[in-house]
Image (cartoon, rainbow, N blue to C red):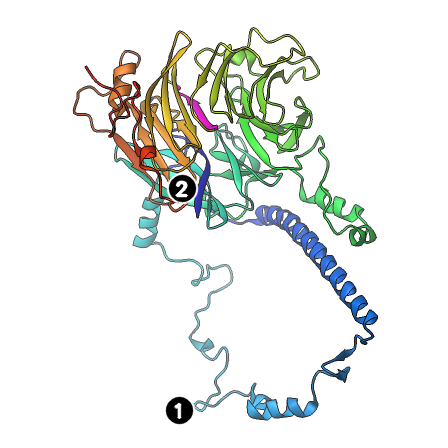
């Protein structure tokens, strides 16, 4: 089973040309020790809970034996015995266990065989020299490996949060647009199922120093911690930073709980939300592009945390949605309103716009008809924002005309689009062309839309064989702005060059420079991994392409050309 739950693009020219291997120094060992203590504390807590359950079952079984009149020391009719010494002696003689540790003598050399009998052939090195068994000599193999790790300035990275055979991990793929190629560069093992990703172009953790640009990713998971990984390091053991409860805090919390209280309470108590870290799964992340050291996170614990990436600490905690879980976040794209945060909740079905400089002020709130999946500002007209829902709808609101405070009922949008029959789980706006939208859904389809004068119309619909779609994102660079990355429940990642689609070229030719001619071949590049994520038997009607006029044509061309 393979499933891709989230993806993120990395801009061209940001990744290191030759990513370096993970190296451990004294400072790194100290940091790893703290992280290991945190993991050991969690494992010990789970072990104690399991042991308490076993002890409780044993006490119950002993009570049953006492009630039946059977002494606990009697087994198989013999009080207090499990076997006899005679049986043990017979076993010793049968298997020659008394001479088991004696080494045999080699008939040719006259020497005894030993565990380290070939120690004379071992190579050794002087103090301060490199161990020949650990350090390979530089040569053709190392040059080939270096070439394989190379990332060109014309390459994009695509980050894919995956679960494969119940193993959560992060795949770092390299997309070569000119070569129509996508491959896995390296991967990172994760401690819990990843739910969301946010690429960070700021240095985080010990590598911060005087650097002004970095190549990191923040990973929100089912656990309460947010892990930040350096994408320019291969074979990393531990993240560059963890945004959440620190090992020292975890140890103090464990010490504050008495052993008696642990025995009485077999079930682990769920921690309460606080101002320092999340206590439940992280559902959404958003980096402030103008204040690049600030990362916002939304959690199922009902809080929004504002993280200071330079220090790795929580600067502020907000509860605009009460105790309801928050599913999506997006910072305002305008530098003049860069402290405005858009947030959506699934439980309360509300969208809130908050100025993080004045969180106590009354925040405008919009109400929709179903659980919220995604919220996103319109980068081409930042007074407006989009909201997608579980009901398959896309709402377009004007932030300048909010509803009256405590207004009952559904808020009135500029327009509402019934985009899909199932939840709109992915949504994006093309960064280059205004009014060019992409929606994707659990109904396994990806749809492209054209919005003119606040009137949306469908350009093309596709089933790209990724299963239920969880992610659809346009590339961030102008050179590849029409490339759409799609991933879903089958695990594979697809990159669709929408500019090679005839319907897209016809609709958007006047707003962007697109390939000309009728002989342009449609491009779809797929990663080699994944597959088998769900039942591959699908109704033939789901495989058919849907044209803009509803004719249901087969093939890639979805719109009749004049």
The residue at 63%/24% (across/down) is: 348
Residue stretch rendered in magenta on the structure: 423-431
Of residue 318 and residue 77, the one placed in the foreground of this image is: 77
Residue 378 horizontal/vertical position (percent): 46, 15
The residue at which mark 2 appears reads as 490
* As drawn, 446 above or below 412: below
Residue 73 horizontal/vertical position (percent): 79, 77
Callout 2: SS: loop
Residue 410 horizontal/vertical position (percent): 58, 14
* Disc 1 crowd, CA 10 A, few/some/many (<14, 14-19, 20+): few
**Residue 21: in sight, yes or no?**
no
Secondary structure mainly formed by the magenta segment: strand
Q: Nearer the viewer, mark 1 or mark 2?
A: 2
Of residue 340 and residue 6, the one placed in the foreground of this image is: 6
The residue at which mark 1 appears reads as 108
* As drawn, 141 above or below 542: below
Residue 402 horizontal/vertical position (percent): 59, 9
**Residue 43: in sight, yes or no?**
yes
**Left or right of residue 91, residue 376 in this image:** left
**Left or right of residue 213, residue 138 in this image:** left
Say whether residue 428 is magenta. Answer: yes
């Amino acid at each position: 089973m393979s499933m891709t739950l989230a993806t993120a693009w990395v801009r061209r020219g940001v990744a290191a040309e030759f990513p370096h291997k993970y190296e451990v120094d004294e400072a790194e060992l100290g940091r790893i020790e703290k992280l290991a203590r945190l993991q050991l504390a969690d494992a010990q807590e789970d072990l104690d809970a399991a042991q308490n359950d076993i002890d409780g079952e044993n006490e119950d079984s002993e009570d049953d034996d006492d009630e039946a009149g059977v002494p606990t020391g009697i087994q198989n009719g013999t009080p207090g015995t499990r076997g006899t010494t005679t049986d043990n002696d017979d076993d010793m003689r049968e298997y020659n266990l008394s001479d088991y540790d004696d080494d045999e003598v080699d008939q040719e050399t006259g020497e005894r065989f030993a565990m380290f009998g070939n120690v004379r052939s071992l190579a050794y090195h002087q103090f301060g020299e490199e161990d020949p068994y650990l350090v390979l000599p530089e040569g053709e193999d190392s040059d080939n490996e270096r070439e394989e790790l190379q990332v060109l300035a014309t390459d994009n990275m695509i980050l894919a949060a995956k679960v494969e055979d119940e193993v959560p991990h992060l795949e770092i793929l390299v997309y070569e647009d000119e070569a129509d190629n996508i491959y896995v560069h390296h991967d990172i093992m994760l401690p819990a199922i990843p739910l969301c990703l946010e690429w960070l172009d700021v240095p985080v953790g010990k590598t911060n120093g005087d650097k002004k640009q970095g190549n990191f990713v923040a990973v929100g998971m089912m656990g309460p911690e947010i892990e930040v990984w350096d994408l320019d390091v291969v074979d990393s053991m531990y993240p560059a930073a963890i945004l959440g409860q620190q090992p020292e805090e975890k140890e103090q919390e464990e010490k504050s709980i008495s052993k008696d209280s642990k025995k009485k309470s077999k079930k682990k108590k769920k921690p309460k939300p606080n101002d320092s870290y999340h206590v439940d799964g992280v559902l959404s992340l958003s980096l402030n592009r103008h204040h690049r050291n600030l990362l916002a996170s939304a959690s199922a614990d009902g809080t929004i945390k504002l993280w200071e990436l330079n220090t790795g600490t929580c600067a502020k905690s907000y509860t605009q949605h009460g105790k309801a879980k928050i599913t999506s976040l997006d910072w305002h794209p305008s530098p003049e309103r860069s402290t405005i945060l858009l947030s959506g909740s699934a439980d309360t079905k509300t969208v809130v716009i908050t100025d993080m400089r004045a969180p106590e002020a009354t925040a405008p709130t919009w109400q929709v008809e179903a659980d919220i999946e995604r919220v996103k500002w319109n980068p081409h007209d930042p007074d407006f924002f989009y909201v997608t829902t579980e009901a398959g709808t896309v709402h377009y609101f004007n932030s300048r005309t909010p509803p009256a405070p405590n207004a009952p009922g559904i808020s009135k949008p500029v327009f509402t689009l019934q985009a899909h029959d199932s939840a709109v789980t992915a949504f994006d706006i093309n960064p280059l062309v205004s009014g060019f939208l992409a929606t994707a859904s659990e109904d396994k389809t990806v749809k492209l839309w054209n919005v003119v004068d606040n009137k949306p119309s469908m350009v093309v619909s596709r089933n790209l064989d990724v299963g239920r779609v969880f992610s659809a994102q346009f590339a961030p660079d102008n050179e590849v702005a029409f490339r759409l990355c799609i991933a879903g429940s089958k695990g594979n990642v697809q990159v669709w060059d929408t500019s090679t689609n005839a319907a897209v070229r016809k609709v958007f030719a006047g707003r962007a420079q697109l390939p000309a001619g009728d002989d342009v071949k449609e491009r779809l590049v797929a990663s080699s991994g994944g597959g088998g994520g769900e039942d591959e038997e699908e109704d033939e009607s789901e495989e058919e392409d849907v044209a803009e006029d509803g004719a249901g044509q087969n093939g890639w061309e979805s719109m009749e050309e004049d």
